[in-house]
Amino acid sequence: DGVLLGDSRYWHEGRVQTLAAVFDAGINLSFYGVGTAAREYGLDTRGGMVQGRWQIGDTKTWFGAGYALADTKVRFDIAPGLPELPDLEGDSRAAALVTSLTHDNRDNLFTPSSGNYLDATVAFFADALGSDADYQRVSLTGIHYRPLSDTLFLGVLASIGLSYGDSPFYLIPAIHMRGVPAMSYQGRQVAQLEAEMRWRFSSRYSAVAFAGTGLARDLSDRFGDQRTANAGGLG
């Protein structure tokens, strides 16, 4: 549960976008970093962000820059300090300068049939910005849609997430894929590949089949070495 207040506006004939938001939320998740069983934990976080995006010329490419700040309290549902559980509870502050470069020429935002979405985002967390520690996060995402016929469409997604420095465990990249529990596969190096086939059998309805695979690796011994996830389904 939580509260989110935000405002997004476009300026200069839609070539500049500004976004401002504040939030106060409680999130319950499962931690899969040690042992064979998931450890239930919660995040109580509050903060805000401001961001600006600028369209580059007459292209479909945007450059973005922003600042984000969040105070987070981590609480586990079991006693901290167990031999198999690192000392992860407590309060932390994350503050970052976030930059992005995004190209999006998809023909539709919600159910695209053709086009590409490419995004590179880098977040710099630093003591000078108000963060408890210095670390960085990098995410690269590419999505391609192609019509195979008037009613059959192929979509392919590939993404990479990287984390450097002393990042809190809950900000380490994770595999985000349909059919995989959220945050269940974390690592400082994460990659995933997913494909879907959509058959539009009427003007209002489509059938979708999808499948994907992901890999999460860690450069330290904290959460283990390597884990893979595979998923698929119909809709």
Image (spheres, rainbow, N blue to C red):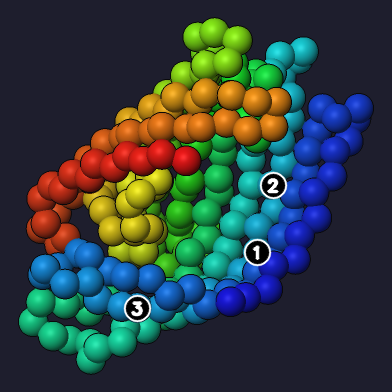
**Relative side of 76 to 4, left or right:** left
Q: Residue extending furthest bottom?
A: 79
Residue that mark 2 sits on:
51
In the image, residue 58 sits, relative to residue 36, either above or below, namely above
Secondary structure, mark 3, is strand
- Which numbered disc, 3 or 2, marks the residue that appears first in the sequence? 3
- Closest to the observer, 118 or 201: 201
Label 3 crowding class (10 Å Cα cut-off): few <14, some 14-19, many 20+?
A: some
Position of residue 180 measured from the top left corner of the image (x, y, whole percent): 33, 51
Disc ID at residue 106: none
Q: Residue at x 24, y 41 (%)?
A: 230
The quadrant where residue 166 appears: bottom left
Q: Residue at point 69% right, 32% down?
A: 204
- Disc 1 marks a residue whose amino acid type is Gly
Task: Identify the residue at horizontal 23%, vertical 91% (top origin).
Answer: 79
- Asked if the residues shown at circle 2 and circle 1 are in contact, with their CB atoms under 8 angstroms apart, the answer is no
Question: Which label number is shown at residue 48?
Answer: 1
Instruction: Pick whichever, 49 or 6, lies toward us.
Output: 6
- Percent x, y of residue 113: 60, 20
Dot 1: few (<14), some (14–19), or many (≥20) neighbours within 10 Å? some
Residue 219 pos. (x, y %): 16, 48
For disc 3, the marked residue is 41
Instruction: Report crowding for label 2: few under 14, some 14 to 19, many 20 or more residues within 10 A (C-alpha).
Output: some
Report the Cα–Cα distance between label 3 and label 2.
30 Å
Identified by mark 2, the residue type is Gln
